[in-house]
């Protein structure tokens, strides 16, 4: 009997450990939040270019997008869709994008969080130094590179800044035979193997960790695309992490609340319309779902859908 109890305890803790490991590895529950990454402003001396010819602002933003897509924890808006909206609003230059305009653009794209930022340092901060060994002059080289970016996460619903942080990463290398490395890269592999490439990768990882932390408390939401008397179609499906059987709550937005001092949106009044249940999450190759009506009536295109 004691052996059976010990075996059951072992199985219980083994399963628990697997669950914890899954969460630790970055697995997220529920629907994926929608993210838009704007091109970062480039406030550097413009000495360094990506292997594609673009500057650090565009380069770091694109690298962040790539890593977010690979991670699979968010639905990331394509660069072409974002650039189109920016062009239509005459906001093509990243320097013109503010938390307010990012929130407005994010609303048009249906995203939950807009990521904006500025690269403030990108390159060498220290060079060669001299030295000696046993009375013999020896050229000792050292190199320190720095990557620094001011990043902000904006709640597109309210315009609130969820986080504003300075991410800074330094990498140093020194040695007798070390030759100071330039900042010209012919391809991605050359960039990835360089000190500046490694510092950039570390900075991107820091931004992603901060995003995971700050987005956890934000409620996911989608919208109704089409509705009839018996069912509705929403703009999220399997690709966003929705599963057949998921129940969602539908709200209708009322008057927008604008702060009289700042002019910033404080959100809007909401009235609960009812509940719906996902019956097919594969519409549009997983980009949309058909839902049955659990309660309520009078659903309309544009009504907001949230997790229970």
Image (tube, helix red, strand yellow):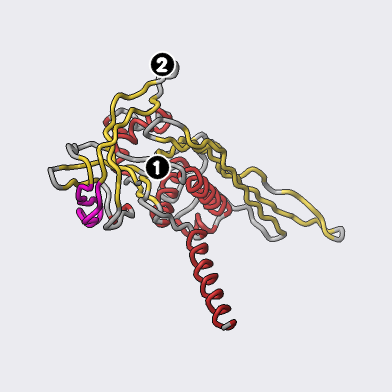
Mark linked to residue 260 = 2
Q: Are marks 2 and 1 in contact (CB under 8 Å)?
A: no
Q: Looking at the figure, which quarter contains the N terminus? A: bottom right
Q: Tell which residue pokes out farthest to the front in this image.
A: 1
State which tag comes first along the sequence, 2 or 1.
1
Disc 1: which residue: 219
Q: Main secondary structure of the magenta part?
A: strand
In the rendered structure, the answer to whether residue 180 lies left or right of residue 249 reads right
Position of residue 176 relative to residue 259, above or below, is below
Considering the numbered disc 2 on the image, is that residue within a helix, a strand or a loop?
loop
What's drawn in magenta, residue-wise?
A: 276-294
Q: Position of residue 19 (x, y in %)?
A: 48, 64
> Pointer 1: residues within 10 angstroms few (<14), some, or many (20+)?
few
Badge 2 density bin: few <14, some 14–19, many ≥20, Cα 10 Å = few
Instruction: Residue 93: name its quadrant.
Output: top left
Residue 144 in picture, x, y percent from top left? 65, 48
Q: Position of residue 40 (x, y in %)?
A: 45, 38
Q: Is residue 267 magenta?
A: no
Residue found at x 27% / y 53%: 237
Name the mark nearer the viewer: 2 or 1: 1
Residue 30 can be seen in this image: yes
Q: Is residue 278 magenta?
A: yes
Measuring from the top left, give residue 61's x and y in whole percent.
43, 44
Q: CA distance from mark 2 to mark 1?
A: 26 Å
Say the numbered circle drawn on residue 99. none
> What residue lies at 34% left-to-right and 28% top-to-bottom?
268
Residue at the top extreme, as displayed: 261
Q: Residue furthest left?
A: 229
Left-right relation of 105 to 300: right
Secondary element type, mark 1 = loop
């Amino acid at each position: 009997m004691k052996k059976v109890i010990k075996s059951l305890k072992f199985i219980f803790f083994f399963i628990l450990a697997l669950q914890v490991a899954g969460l630790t590895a970055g697995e997220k529950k529920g629907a994926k939040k929608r993210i838009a990454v704007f091109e970062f402003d480039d406030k550097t001396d413009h000495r360094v270019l990506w292997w594609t010819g673009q500057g650090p602002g565009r380069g770091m933003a694109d690298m962040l997008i790539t890593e977010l897509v690979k991670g699979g924890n968010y639905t990331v808006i394509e660069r072409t869709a974002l650039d189109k909206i920016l062009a239509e609003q005459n906001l093509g230059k990243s320097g013109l994008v503010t938390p307010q305009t990012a929130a407005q653009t994010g609303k048009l794209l249906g995203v939950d969080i807009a990521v904006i930022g500025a690269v403030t340092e990108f390159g060498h901060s220290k060079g060669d130094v001299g030295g000696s060994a046993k009375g013999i002059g020896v050229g000792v080289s050292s190199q320190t590179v720095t990557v620094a970016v001011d990043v902000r996460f904006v709640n597109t619903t309210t315009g609130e800044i969820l986080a504003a942080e300075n991410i800074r990463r330094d990498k140093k290398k020194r040695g007798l035979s070390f030759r100071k490395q330039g900042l010209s890269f012919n391809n991605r592999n050359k960039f990835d193997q360089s000190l500046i490439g490694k510092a950039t990768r570390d900075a991107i990882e820091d931004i992603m960790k901060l995003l995971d932390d700050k987005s956890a408390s934000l409620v996911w939401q989608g919208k109704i695309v089409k509705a009839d008397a018996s069912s509705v179609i929403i703009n999220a499906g399997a690709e966003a992490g929705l599963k057949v059987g998921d129940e969602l709550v539908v709200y209708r937005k009322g008057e927008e609340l604008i702060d009289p001092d700042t002019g910033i949106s404080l959100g809007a009044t909401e009235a609960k319309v009812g509940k719906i249940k996902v019956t097919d999450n594969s519409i549009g190759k997983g980009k949309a779902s058909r839902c049955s009506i659990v309660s309520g009536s009078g659903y309309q295109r544009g009504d907001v859908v949230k997790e229970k």
